[in-house]
Image (cartoon, rainbow, N blue to C red):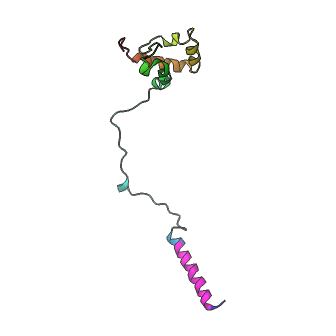
Amino acid sequence: MNVHNKLFLIGYGLTLSLALVGCGGGSSSTSTPSDSTNTPTPTLPIEYKADAGRLLGSQCAQCHGTNGVSVNSWDSIAGESDLADEIFDDEPIMTAQAHGYTSEEITLIGNWLKTLTHNEND
């Protein structure tokens, strides 16, 4: 191997070593962002809490209409207070639907329906 090739390999090795060190390859320190770049998370003026009864009752809208006000031949259920009793009546469709919920979930749906209003002219 001639001197020219040896110098080339030494120069190439040094350049590669410096490049790795410059890229942080050997650094074990962690950097933290400065406090001046941290901005506080904005807060919403109103707290939002998902209504479990409303979420569970969304399935009812397919037959009983949005917010429990039916636009077809099915009963409107907005404002119903005895849903837990009626849901297991002789209606096979409702009985099948009811078996998809726990008694706690049926109570949540019923409590949500009680909060809805139904105008007979709707």
Residue 23 in the figure: left or right of residue 114: right
Please state which of residues 90 and 7 is positioned toward the viewer in this rendering: 90
Boundaries of the magenta span = 3-19
Q: Is residue 67 above or below residue 2?
A: above
Residue 108 in view (yes/no): no
Residue 12 in the figure: left or right of residue 74: right
Residue 78 position, x and y percent, is 42, 15
Q: Within the image, what quadrant is residue 50 found in?
A: top left
Please state which of residues 107 and 91 is positioned toward the viewer in this rendering: 91
Residue 80 position, x and y percent, is 44, 12
Q: Is residue 10 above or below residue 44?
A: below
Residue 112 position, x and y percent, is 44, 20
Q: Is residue 87 above or below residue 34?
A: above
Q: Is residue 92 above or below residue 5?
A: above
Residue 45 position, x and y percent, is 32, 36
Q: Is residue 10 magenta?
A: yes
Question: Which image quarter holds the C terminus?
Answer: top left
